[in-house]
Image (cartoon, grey):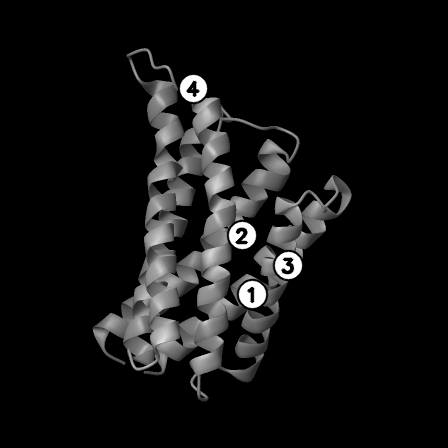
């Protein structure tokens, strides 16, 4: 394993931990019924989100290196997901900068936090399309369980996100959907990808 793939593997493992940490903050510390910027833990949540998105960027870039650039659909999906995640990266720290700024602003930390959350939903679509194409071009590098988890997660996420977009998901099933696709299947896929990076 070369140093580049070792870093990709470590980034993937870090992304798993950070994804679960983000969920713990959102579900148990902040609470799903608390919109806006959480002043007590906002700075910590922002830093965790920043690191989570930074590791995702590394994973996407590493996947292009791992699977090459022969398949134009995969490369296109990876590049679009990379750009989308880059936009998301900028929204992670912005609410805290606004909240702690010594200067007044016409944009509130609450507004920016809510906008960032909405942007994340679009990023989830882009990442799902990237995962679909990654599992499609994979020829045995990924463990079979990771490939299955990735496919189910990506297709399931697309259905759930578009159902959310059209207002078809009630609050009662929103958290179970997030747990299944974002906290169970996504980390399984990324953990498998970390093993694939480590083996190459």
* Point 58% across, 32% down: residue: 30
Q: Where, by quadrant of the figure, is residue 42 drawn? A: top left
Q: Which residue is mark 3?
A: 159
For marks 3 and 2, the one nearer the N-term is 2
Q: From the viewer's perspective, is the residue at label 4 or at label 3 nearer? A: 3
Q: Secondary structure at mark 3?
A: helix
Q: Residues within 10 Å of mark 4 (few under 14, many from 20)?
A: some
Q: Is residue 156 left or right of residue 198?
A: right
Q: From the viewer's side, name the closer residue of 198 and 54.
A: 54
* Residue 11 x, y percent position in the rendering: 35, 62
Number of numbered discs: 4
Q: From the viewer's perspective, is the residue at label 4 or at label 2 nearer? A: 4
Q: Is residue 18 left or right of residue 103?
A: right
Q: Which residue is mark 1?
A: 154
Q: From the viewer's perspective, is the residue at label 1 or at label 3 nearer? A: 3
* Point 59% across, 56% down: residue: 183
């Amino acid at each position: 394993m070369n140093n580049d793939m070792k870093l990709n593997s470590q980034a993937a493992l870090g992304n798993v931990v950070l994804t679960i940490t983000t969920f713990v903050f959102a579900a148990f510390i902040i609470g799903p019924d608390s919109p806006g910027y959480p002043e007590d833990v906002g700075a910590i949540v922002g830093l965790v989100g920043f690191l989570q998105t930074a590791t995702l960027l590394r994973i996407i870039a590493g996947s292009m290196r791992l699977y090459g650039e022969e398949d134009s659909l995969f490369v296109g999906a990876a590049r679009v997901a990379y750009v989308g995640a880059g936009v998301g990266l900028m929204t992670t720290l912005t609410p805290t900068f606004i909240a702690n700024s010594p200067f007044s602003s016409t944009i509130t930390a609450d507004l920016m936090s809510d906008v960032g959350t909405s942007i994340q939903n679009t990023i989830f679509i882009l990442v799902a399309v990237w995962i679909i194409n990654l599992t499609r071009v994979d020829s045995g590098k990924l463990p079979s369980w990771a490939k299955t988890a990735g496919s189910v997660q990506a297709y399931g996420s697309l259905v759930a996100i578009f159902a959310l977009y059209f207002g078809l998901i009630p609050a009662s099933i929103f958290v179970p959907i997030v747990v299944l696709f974002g906290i169970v299947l996504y980390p399984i896929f990324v953990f498998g990808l970390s093993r694939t990076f480590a083996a190459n």
